[in-house]
Image (cartoon, rainbow, N blue to C red):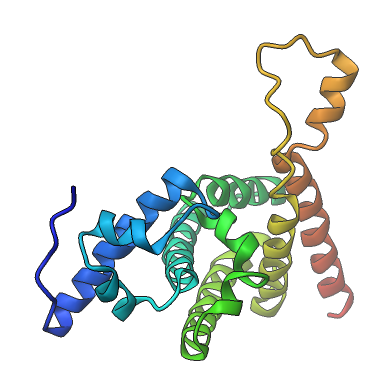
């Protein structure tokens, strides 16, 4: 059973407590998923009274928005750190897909961001996180431009398009688990053709080449 903590009074204490709640929220989300996530259980896991929890996050969507912002920063830093000058389009696209899919909660929250999460959060929270998103897109584009041979503006266009593509392919791996079954070769080839990584990388390369061609044609 969680031990109830004393009320945070200083700004540093409040920031620390907020992070403790988010750490507990990440664990709770990984355990039960989106639909079963509850503020009551989060309060228990984080060791605060439910009323205290609402001083930090007024809705569970506020929690999810903060979790997404946190995961976006972590993922984008990791993605940028692994970019190299000699990367081709395929390697770049594969890295973006694989690091995003491996980031805890990142893609699952991204999919729900605009259609669900942002509809039940405060306007100041939306403004704050949109500014963060814009900064992270700019940072990714700045790091990607020399790798892809694009201008900053063209790289920004690519990054935005690949974000939309990532949402689109995210459900491709959600079919039934056929491990242990003897799947006919033709059926397996068909299934493999719809794997999220293959779909993402193939279409991401088309997008990058298209933007690069448009850029060259306009020069």
Identify the residue at horizontal 74%, vertical 37% (top origin): 195
Query: Residue 196 in the image: x percent, y percent?
Result: 72, 42
Q: Is residue 3 above or below residue 64?
A: above
Query: Residue 175 in the image: x percent, y percent?
Result: 73, 34
Q: Nearer the viewer, residue 56 or 16?
A: 56
Instruction: Please indicate whether residue 133 sits to the left or right of residue 203 in the image.
Output: left
Query: Residue 90 in the image: x percent, y percent?
Result: 71, 46
Quadrant assignment, res 91: top right
Query: Residue 2 in the image: x percent, y percent?
Result: 18, 52
User: Which quarter of the image is occupied by the C terminus?
Assistant: bottom right
Q: Is residue 168 above or below residue 73?
A: above
Identify the residue at horizontal 86%, vertical 66% (top origin): 213
Number of numbered labels in the structure image: 0
Instruction: Please indicate whether residue 205 sits to the left or right of residue 26 in the image.
Output: right
Q: Is residue 63 above or below residue 30?
A: below
Q: Nearer the viewer, residue 171 or 136?
A: 171
Identify the residue at horizontal 55%, vertical 68% (top origin): 140
Identify the residue at horizontal 9%, vertical 70% (top origin): 6
Q: Nearer the viewer, residue 134 or 114?
A: 114
């Amino acid at each position: 059973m969680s031990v109830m903590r004393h009320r945070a009074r200083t700004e540093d204490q409040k920031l620390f407590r907020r992070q403790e709640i988010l750490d507990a929220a990440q664990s709770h989300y990984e355990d039960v998923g989106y639909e079963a996530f509850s503020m009551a259980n989060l309060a228990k896991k984080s060791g605060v009274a439910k009323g205290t929890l609402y001083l930090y996050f007024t809705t569970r969507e506020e929690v999810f928005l903060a979790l997404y912002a946190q995961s976006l920063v972590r993922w984008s830093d990791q993605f940028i750190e692994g970019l190299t000058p000699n990367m081709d389009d395929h390697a770049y696209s594969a890295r973006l897909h694989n690091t995003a899919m491996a980031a805890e909660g990142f893609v699952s929250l991204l999919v729900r961001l605009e259609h669900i999460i942002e509809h039940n959060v405060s306007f100041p929270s939306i403004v704050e996180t949109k500014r963060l998103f814009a900064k992270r897109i700019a940072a990714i584009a700045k790091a990607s431009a020399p790798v892809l041979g694009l201008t900053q503006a063209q790289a920004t266009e690519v990054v935005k398009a690949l974000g939309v593509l990532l949402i689109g392919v995210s459900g491709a791996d959600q079919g039934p688990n056929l491990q242990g079954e003897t799947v006919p070769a033709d059926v397996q080839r068909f299934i493999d053709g719809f794997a999220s990584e293959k779909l993402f990388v193939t279409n991401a390369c088309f997008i990058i080449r298209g933007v690069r061609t448009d850029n060259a044609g306009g020069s």
